[in-house]
Image (spheres, grey):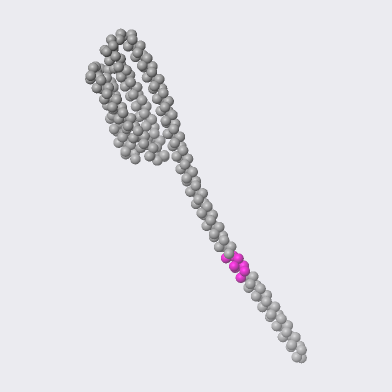
Amino acid sequence: MSAEFQGYEQDYGVLTAEITSRIGKIPKLSGEEKKQMVMNVEKQLEEAKELLEQMDLEVREIPAQSRGMYSNRMRSYKQEMGKLETDFKRSRIAYSDEVRGELLGDDGSSSESQRAHLLDNTERLERSSRRLEAGYQIAVETEQVGQNILENLSQDREKIQRARERLRETDTNLGKSSRILTGMLRRIIQNRVLLVVLGIIIVFTIILAIYFSFRGH
C-alpha cells in the first residue's frame, strides 16, 4: 500500500513543481501566451487535486497503526495545494484586470479598486476553504477513531465468546466429574452394606454354632 502512495506522491511532487514554475511566469506574459498559460495551470491544478484524492484513498486503506505518518503528509500536501491555488488566483486576477482594461479602457484607479475588491473576496474564500478543510480533517479523524473503537469492540467480543466457550467446557467437565464421583460413592456405599450384611451373617452363624454346640453337650 505504501508503494502505491509513494508513486502518487512522486507524481504530485513533479506536478506541483511545474505548477509553481508556471504560476511564476504568468505575470511576465501577455496576450494569447498568458491566456494559454492560465488554462494550462488550471488543468494541472485539477490533475493535482485528483492525485490528492487518490493519495487520500490510499491512506484510508493503510492500517490504523501506520496511518498517522501518511495523514500528516497529506495535511502538508493539502496546505501546499491551498497555497498554490491562492497564488494562482492572484495571478489570474491580475490577468483578468489586464484583459478587462484592454477591452473597456478602465483607468488605473478603477482597476486598483476592483483588484482590491477581488483580493478581499479571494481571502474570504480562502478562509472558508480552510474552515471546510479543518471540518473535513475532523471528520476523517473521527472516522478513524470510530474504526479503532469498532475494532476494539470486535476483539473484546471475540474474547468474551472464547471465555464463554471455556466456561461451557468447564461446566461439561465438572458434570462428568460429578457423575463419576457419584458412581464411585454409590459403589463404596454398596460395598460397605455388603460388608455389614456379611458381618452380621458371620456373627449369626458363630452364635448358632455356639448354641448348638452347648445344646449337644
The spot of residue 202 in percent (x, y) is: 68, 80
Q: Name which residue lies at 34% across and 22% down.
A: 86
Q: Is residue 124 above or below residue 215?
A: above
Q: Name which residue lies at 29% across and 25% down.
A: 42
The spot of residue 154 in percent (x, y) is: 47, 45
Q: Viewer-proximal residue, 64 or 27?
A: 27
Q: Main secondary structure of the magenta part?
A: helix
Any magenta on residue 181?
Answer: yes
- Left or right: 91 as drawn, with respect to 148: left
Q: Is residue 5 visible?
A: yes
The spot of residue 82 in percent (x, y) is: 36, 25
Q: Name which residue lies at 28% across and 20% down.
A: 24
The spot of residue 207 in percent (x, y) is: 73, 83
Q: Viewer-proximal residue, 50 or 9?
A: 50
From the image, which quarter does the N terminus lie in? top left
Q: Is residue 22 visible?
A: no
Residue sticking out furthest to the front: 104
Q: Quadrant of residue 176?
A: bottom right
Q: Viewer-proximal residue, 183 or 204?
A: 183
Please state the total of marks drawn on the protein image.
0
Q: Is residue 30 above or below residue 192?
A: above
Any magenta on residue 157?
Answer: no
From the image, which quarter does the C terminus lie in? bottom right
- Left or right: 37 as drawn, with respect to 132: left
Magenta-drawn segment: 180-187
- Left or right: 22 as drawn, with respect to 151: left
Q: Name which residue lies at 73% across and 84% down.
A: 208
Residue sticking out furthest to the bottom: 217
